Image (tube, helix red, strand yellow):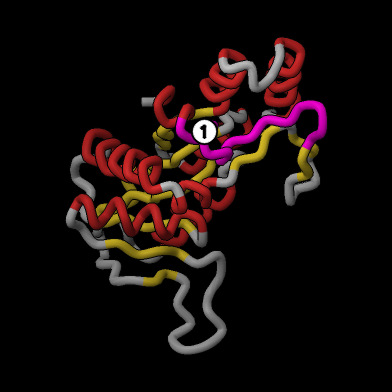
Amino acid sequence: MKKKIAGHLLDIGAVFFRPEEPFTWASGIKSPVYCDSRLILTAPEVRNDVELAIADTVTKEYPETEALFGTSTAGIAHAAIAAHIMGIPMGYVRSSNKDHGRNNQIEGRLDKGQKVVVVEDLISTAGSAVQTVEVLREAGAQVLGIVSIFTYGMEKGLRRLKEAGVKNRSLSDFNTAAEMALERSLVDKEGYEQLMKFIEENGR
């Protein structure tokens, strides 16, 4: 599955490697890779495989799941489609409370003790995913874990997930995509080595 999903992401440019001209992340980090999972939604065949893979992963890894909750905003659509496939409820968690209406941070019905899985598009340092888990826990949910589409596999993110006591299962990852990019000549050997160096230096 990791190679299939990585191949899809490379095909549609959702994962794009540019070691010779790094991207600037919101954190200010200069990165040779950029991941835009929103492109999945505009590629029907890829979207179908991704959502089926999310539903299958939830079913296998977290068989007691009663509802899916997406992270805002990129996880919302994926949680909705996967929940529809599974025939279970779905909601999402805002990054902060609304400043109007009922001031909700959690959108959708959530019952005390309900067993839920968080759907996230991308795990880098895992900040947004862990924040979503904590909000759901504070509201009384039993969070079984996270399913994400792609992860960089950074030590910082892995450590944060471990400290939060939450399991993540990603459909694909940075190493798999980088190896496939090398195989497809999307990057050369030198570029591949730069990718590996980036993860090593920024993953702590």
In the figure, 99 relative to 202: above or below? Answer: below
Give the tally of numbered discs: 1
**Highlighted magenta segment, given as a residue range:** 8-22
- Viewer-proximal residue among 84 and 71: 84
Confirm whether the magenta stretch covers residue 21. Answer: yes
The amino acid marked with disc number 1 is Asp
Q: Is the residue 86 above or below the residue 125 in the image?
A: below
- Image quarter for residue 179? top right
Measured from the top left, where is residue 52 in percent x and y? Answer: 28, 41
Q: Can you identify the residue that label 1 sits on?
A: 11
Image quarter hosting the N terminus: top left
Question: Mark 1: which secondary structure?
Answer: helix
Q: Residue furthest bottom?
A: 101
67 on left or right of 173 = left
Which residue is at the front of the view, 6 or 146? 6
Q: Quadrant of the C terminus?
A: top right
Q: Could you classify mark 1 by the number of other residues whose Cα lies within 10 Å: few (under 14), some (14-19), or many (20 or more)?
A: few
Image location (x, y in percent) of residue 5: 42, 31
